[in-house]
Image (cartoon, rainbow, N blue to C red):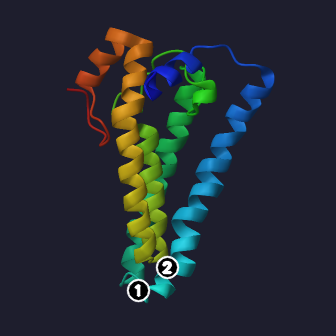
Amino acid sequence: MKLADKIASYSSNPRSGKQTRIARILPIFVFFFFFPTMLFLVPHMLLDQWLNLPAIPNPPLRMAIGGAMIVTGVVFLLMTLKAQRDIGKGTPMPLMATQKLVVQKPYAWTRNPLAFGLLNLYFGISIFMGSIASVLVVTFFSVIILSYIKFVEEKELEQRYGADYVAYKEQTSFLIPLLRR
């Protein structure tokens, strides 16, 4: 059984109270503690020094660019989580996946507003900090996450939502927010 099949099967099963609590707490830990430690603290505190990498130049410009990306990322993350909870009746985690296909904003602009928001947030923090190693680690992380979304998650969504998801996929960009075609 392929990974997408397993996730689709698991996502359609009802959740216990304990699983629901875990599904609500786990994303907070993963996205706001685990990933930031691996993507910012370790690269900035260890790799930049170990590789003797300089800081990204022009602190005022990098802080402005990084700050704008952080704000954009947080806005998209909050909008996405609200849409998943209120419309989709779920979370970003397969433990409590959405039960309804969400195509309203921010999903009307991109099929992956959570990834868009996280990548903006993570690149923004890396740039704001001026850490070249962090930018490189976030780039590597981005390739892995986007590959997973493209090759596993999209297949799982096609299985769960069928023709509705395929039609939505044809109309909506993969990552960069655009008005519907």
For the C terminus, the quadrant is top left
Look at 58% across and 20% down and name the residue there: 10
Crowd rating for badge 2 (residues with CA inside 10 Å; few <14, some 14–19, many 20+): some
Q: Mark 2 points at which residue?
A: 47
Element assignment for label 2: helix
Q: Where is residue 123 in the image (x, y as percent from the top left)?
A: 42, 62
Q: Where is residue 1 in the image (x, y as percent from the top left)?
A: 46, 21
Q: Please say whether residue 60 is visible from this viewpoint.
A: yes
Element assignment for label 1: loop
Who is closer to the viewer here, 144 or 33?
144
Crowd rating for badge 1 (residues with CA inside 10 Å; few <14, some 14–19, many 20+): few
Q: Are marks 1 and 2 in contact (CB under 8 Å)?
A: yes
Question: What is the residue that sits farthest to the left in this orientation?
Answer: 181
- Mark carried by residue 53: 1
Look at 62% across and 53% down and name the residue there: 32
Looking at marks 1 and 2 on the same chain, the residue that comes earlier in the sequence is marked by 2
Q: Where is residue 6 in the image (x, y as percent from the top left)?
A: 51, 22
Q: Quadrant of residue 124?
A: bottom left
Q: In this view, does 157 lie above or below 123?
A: above
Question: What is the residue that sits farthest to the top in this orientation?
Answer: 163
How many circles with numbers are drawn on the protein?
Answer: 2
- Mark carried by residue 34: none
Q: What residue type is labelled 1?
A: Leu
Look at 57% across and 29% down and name the residue there: 94
Q: What residue type is labelled 2?
A: Leu
Question: What is the residue that sits farthest to the front in this orientation?
Answer: 1
Q: Please say whether residue 103 is visible from this viewpoint.
A: no
Q: Is residue 141 left or right of residue 82?
A: left
Q: Where is residue 38 in the image (x, y as percent from the top left)?
A: 56, 63
Q: In this view, does 9 lie above or below 78?
A: above
Q: Is residue 69 above or below residue 84?
A: below
